[in-house]
Image: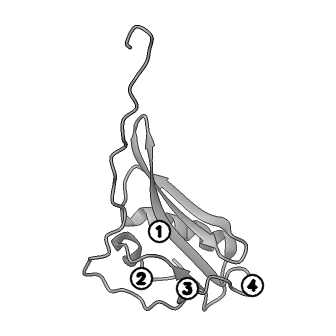
Amino acid sequence: MAEHGIRAKTKRKFIVTTDSKHSLPVAPDLVQQRFTPQAPNQLLCGDITYIATDEGWLYLAAVIDMFSRQVVGWSLQPHMQTSLVKDALAMAWWRRRPEPGAIFHSDRGANIAAMTSWPL
């Protein structure tokens, strides 16, 4: 295999990106599975995922406007700290300037739950 440059394909290690069992306050679920706003910038949703690269894991936080389904903010960093989400939210806010009353919906992960103010 080495002579021909062939490598075995291995399973990727599973990385948990959501910590729902944290002691941080959890906001009420204002969306209740209704993901169809009537206009742009009313409902923004976000999540974190991870990407394997040759240099190691990268974490991607994305914010999506649920009206247009466009990514309006994102951040890619080699760590999964609160700044990852803050940067994605800041980009979304600076690009879209949502009116007061806009909702940001996410899972109950500790990184996102640590965000207590909108706008930033």
* Disc 3: which residue: 33
The answer to whether 4 is drawn above or below residue 59 in the figure is above
The CA distance from mark 4 to mark 3 is: 17 Å
Characterize the local packing of mark 2: few (<14), some (14-19) or many (20 or more) Cα atoms within 10 angstroms: few
Question: Along the line of sight, which residue is nearer the eye, 28 or 101?
Answer: 28
Tell me if label 4 and label 1 are in contact, CB under 8 Å.
no
Gap between marks 3 and 2 measured at Cα: 22 Å
Residue 81: quadrant of the picture: bottom left
- Which amino acid is tagged 3? Gln
Do the residues bearing badges 1 and 3 touch, measured as CB atoms within 8 Å?
A: no
Q: Quadrant of the N terminus?
A: top left
Q: Residues within 10 Å of mark 3 (few under 14, many from 20)?
A: few
Which residue shows up at 47% across the image and 68% down it?
Answer: 86
Which class describes the residues within 10 Å of circle 1: few (<14), some (14-19), or many (20+)?
many
Q: CA distance from mark 4 to mark 1?
A: 24 Å
Marked residue nearer the N-terminal end (2 or 1): 1
In this orientation, which residue lies closer to the viewer: 54 or 3? 3
The residue wearing badge 2 is 116
Q: Residue 27: horizontal and vertical position, in percent?
A: 41, 88
> Who comes first in sequence, dot 3 or dot 2?
3
Earlier-in-chain disc, 2 versus 4:
4
**Of callouts 4 and 1, the N-terminal one:** 4
Q: Please tell me whether mark 3 sits on a helix, a strand or a loop.
A: loop
Tell me the element at label 4.
Answer: loop
Q: Three-letter amino acid code at disc 4?
A: Ala
Tag 1 residue: 86
Q: Give yes or no for contact between labels 4 and 3 (Cβ–Cβ under 8 Å).
A: no
Work out which residue is located at the far top of the displayed protein and give it: 3
Please give the residue where the numbered disc 4 appears in the rendered image.
39
Please name which of the two marks, 2 or 4, marks the residue nearer to the observer. Answer: 4
x and y, in percent, of residue 87 in the image = 50, 64
